[in-house]
Image (spheres, grey):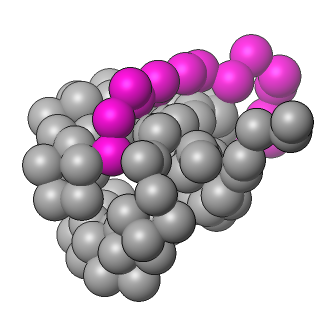
Amino acid sequence: MVVNTTFHVEESAEAEFIEWIKTEYIPEAQESVKLHSPLFMRILTPMEGGVGYAVQLQAMSKAHVETWIDSEQPRLLSAMARKFGKKVMFFTTVMEKVK
């Protein structure tokens, strides 16, 4: 399973956001619920009013995904909201490989 979180970031917050993802969000995901193989990607499709990024994290089990979605990610995203306000918006999707 893959947890994908897509972010819309105002350009004025972009550099600080990138640093926060690299130093806070991804390490916490890897430590707290053992999500692994992170991909931090810039979305090349133009976005009105900012730039897009996506973080994809792989999970070993549905239980790991649920722990992340229900408790760990909300805590981090609350911290993100305090830090960036409305300069960063997001949505999360959970995906699985089609067999």
Q: In which quarter of the image is residue 54?
A: top right
Give the magenta-colored segment's residue range.
Answer: 35-49
Instruction: Please state, as top left, top right, bottom left or bottom right, where the C terminus lies in the image.
Output: top right
Answer left or right for 96 relative to 8.
right
Residue at horizontal 33%, vertical 46%?
A: 35
Q: In which quarter of the image is residue 10?
A: top right
Question: Does residue 52 show up magenta in the picture?
Answer: no
In this rendering, the answer to whether 40 lies above or below 2 is above
**With respect to residue 5, does 17 lie above or below?**
above
Q: Say if 92 sits above or below 57 in the image.
A: below
Q: Is residue 91 visible?
A: yes
Q: Residue at x 74, y 16 (%)?
A: 44
State left or right for residue 90 relative to residue 18: right
Asked whether residue 42 is drawn in magenta, I would say yes
From the top left corner, tell me how far across and down residue 68 is, in percent: 37, 68
Residue sitting farthest toward the front:
99
Q: Is residue 6 left or right of residue 83?
A: right
